[in-house]
Amino acid sequence: MRMRYSLIVSLFSISLLSGCSTLSSLNPFGEKLEVMAPVPEFAAEFSQRQIWEKSVGKGSGEYFSTLRPAHDNGTIYAADRQGTVMAIDATSGNTIWEIQLAESVGLLSSRKSALLSGGVSVYNNRVYIGSERGILYSIDSATGQLIWEVQAAGEIVARPTIEKDKIMLVTTNGKLQVLNIADGTEVWRADLDVPVLSLRGQSSPITVEDKFVIVGGDNGRINAFTFDLGQLVWQERVAEPLGATEIDQLGDIDAQPVFHNGILYAIAFNNMLVAFDFNSGEALWRAEYGSIRDFIVTDDVIYLTDQNDHIYALNTSDYQLIWKQDGLNKRFVTAPALVGNNIVVADGEGYVFWLNKQTGAFVASEQLDRSGFVADPLTVNTKVILQARKGSVYAIER
């Protein structure tokens, strides 16, 4: 029977302390062991097809660095922790360009790792990626030429968000920064309260109607700022501190909020999914689901992976359960991706699972990469793009 350390977080690459970012520090709070579910057995309805595989540097290795690729206009953009950024043709898997952001040091041409983290963003012919060194890079998406780099207010471990002429990013020391897209100069910043103990992760901001910036904080609150000036419009609590210890009371919002049909959805670690009326900030409903993974909202259904690696489909109007899949308990499962009539997730042992989106039943699975998956899957039309811990990027479809 396979066992693993339990850190109250279902992702093996998450550490509670900002200074502890390797897998060896997973369980600083005790040696309690929990059972990881075996690979589910079922009658597969189809076999997934691998379209291509591309090696992008050395991946993230043993470090917390959820380097999720991005897609724009037929090109996949991916990176590794060391500093490799690559543009890949989404159809063929051929390399279009590659740039190295790691610094050359010494006479032997060794390189200082760029510590890229959080994932890639693409907007208006530019590629953006941040680092644990607090540097944000802007790269020409057609040529791979470095346009500019700027020092942010702190570590960047979440994907930057770009809208119109502004870049929005959140640093691990609780700064929401909005930068000029042309040269990276700061337009405005806001302070987000950071508790003494928090998860090592951040929520990527979203924009609403080009008028507001929405971001979740480590303190369990969701914040709405004006897009142009950074004035706080409203702030509401998602997570309620529960339990007797600081660990029990963790309520970080590390998943990106979702705005859909006038409603803002946010989920926090440990205990709460909330739907807000955006105009007033008033909570329409609250449901006891906790996660640090991004989630999907359609007109009718919310799909999410919780911190126990259970996958849920909920009704958007009243959060009633449609189905639950708990067959991947403690398998370090990614956020769900929606592909046609299927939900796709991957796990820490490198398996990819396809679920029926109506019932949650497993319909296909395959071990794709033994190094495992940490970063969430990306959908490109009928394809699913996945990046493994050791750097390989895969394009698959059913």
Image: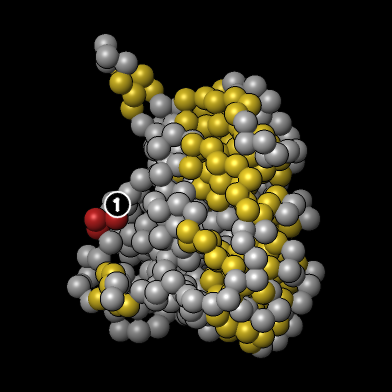
Residue 360: percent from left, percent from top? 62, 78
Q: Secondary structure at mark 1?
A: loop
Provide the residue designation for mark 1.
Answer: 22
**Quarter of the image where one finds residue 108:** top left
At 42% from the left and 48% from the top, the residue drawn is 389
Residue 222, visible in the rendered structure: no
Identify which residue, 344 or 47, lies in the foreground.
47
Residue in the picture at 33% in, 27% down: 112
Image quarter where the C terminus lies is bottom right
Quarter holding residue 142: top right
In terms of depth relative to the viewer, which is nearer, 153 or 129? 129
Up/down of 128 relative to 347, above or below: above
* Amino acid, disc 1: Thr
For residue 147, above or below residue 158: above
Give the x, y percent position of residue 17.
30, 58
Residue 284 horizontal side relative to residue 21, left or right: right
Residue 340 position, x and y percent, is 74, 64
Q: Residues within 10 Å of mark 1 (few under 14, many from 20)?
A: some
200 lies left or right of 260: left
Q: Residue at x 27, y 69 (%)?
A: 5
